[in-house]
Amino acid sequence: MADSLLSFPPEVAPEDWDTILHAAGNPEQYGALRESPLARIYSPLINVSDLGRPFLFGQLGQSLDGRIATPTGKSHFINSLEAIRHLHRLRALADAVIVGVGTAIADDPQLTVRHVPGPNPARVIIDPAGRLPATARCLRDDGARRIVLQGKVVPRPPGIEALTLPADGGRIEPAAIIDAVGGLGFRRILVEGGADTVSRFLDAQLLDRLHLLVAPLIIGSGPIGISLSVIDGLADALRPRHAIYRFDDGDLLIDCDFSHVEGAP
Ligand SMILES: NC(=O)c1ccc[n+]([C@@H]2O[C@H](COP(=O)([O-])OP(=O)(O)OC[C@H]3O[C@@H](n4cnc5c(N)ncnc54)[C@H](OP(=O)(O)O)[C@@H]3O)[C@@H](O)[C@H]2O)c1
């Protein structure tokens, strides 16, 4: 359970972030993180080398009423600048970032790290039916690996790694996705969105952690964020351990930890 509302460090000291980035690339440096005020938030995402499987962390930005866009698809920008910086830190700590093709088409994101120092992760797009245009910005060659997971063989631009996975009625098992991405050597994987993709991984009990970024606004209509299989009683609801932080500019970070939830990875 949350102890209280915590303040996100208002000024992220560059040396503290450097320490975290350095530790991400050097697991033996993990001990050094305990001194940093950012460690409580970011160190659980780093020290994952002995799990024997990839560590998955998801993120989702939403309004107070759990919406991720207006009915006409306007979503820029629900979250505040500090929350967006936090998202870029999550990208920088990930070996690979996964998005569904819905996001790749709707937002045409670059999926690079621009708001903070740090390396760009590999980009993985789940595109079972080959809807992703060759001109998508996430496919641009900037040195990062670009990977498409598809349910059938589809021609892709040069330089794109395409993996064809079994798809049952267009659905690729989330566990098969993680086996494939883990098999490429990635250990820390950020599931960045959209809502459908994050929900599929959460429903399959594959997320170790979920960072919900809640903006203090009520949209009142439009698509919602998390949507899982129907349950009957509240005893079946997920009750992650969590900590809540408030960014200086108003958004909340709810850091959900599923490691103790029955059936969790
Ligand atoms: N608030 C946030 O943090 C955030 C983050 C990212 C995006 N967004 C917003 O979210 C919206 C898009 O999200 P969305 O939920 O509509 O779509 P999405 O999650 O980006 O993509 C969903 C699509 O990805 C494919 N997919 C994902 N997992 C799959 C699996 N296991 N097996 C087979 N196919 C799979 C399917 O493609 P097919 O349809 O081809 O079968 C599915 O329809 C946009 O409006 C974007 O702005 C918000």
Image: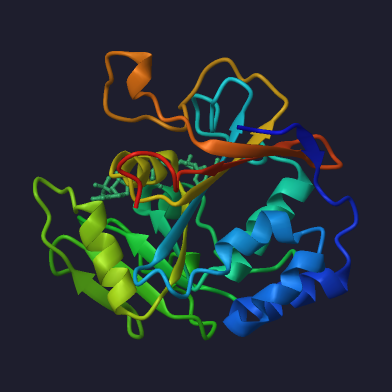
Is residue 116 in view from this perspective? no
Location of residue 173 with respect to 161 vertically, above or below: above
> Horizontally, is 262 left or right of 6 in the view?
left
* Residue 205 point in image, percent of width and height: 32, 45
Give ligand 1's quarter of the image: top left
Foreground of the two, 191 or 124: 191
Q: Is residue 194 left or right of residue 212?
A: left
Quarter holding residue 216: top right
Residue that appears at 68% across and 54% down: 41
Residue drawn where x is 54% and y is 82% of the image: 142
Residue at position x 54%, y 25% from top?
66
- On the image, the x and y values in percent for residue 132 come to 33, 60
Nearer-the-camera pick, 233 or 127 = 233
- The front one of 132 and 82 is 82
In the displayed structure, 130 sits above or below 61; it is below
Is residue 198 among the parts visible in the rendering? yes
Asked if 74 appears above or below 87 in the picture, the reply is above
Count up the numbered dots: 0
Q: Nearer the viewer, residue 261 or 147?
A: 261
Q: How is the image coloured?
A: rainbow
- The residue that appears at 33% across and 23% down in the rendered structure is 236
Find residue 100 and report its horizontal and vertical position in percent.
37, 52
Percent position (x, y) of residue 213?
Answer: 63, 39
Say which quarter of the image contains residue 1. Answer: top right
Residue 100 lies left or right of residue 16; in this view the side is left
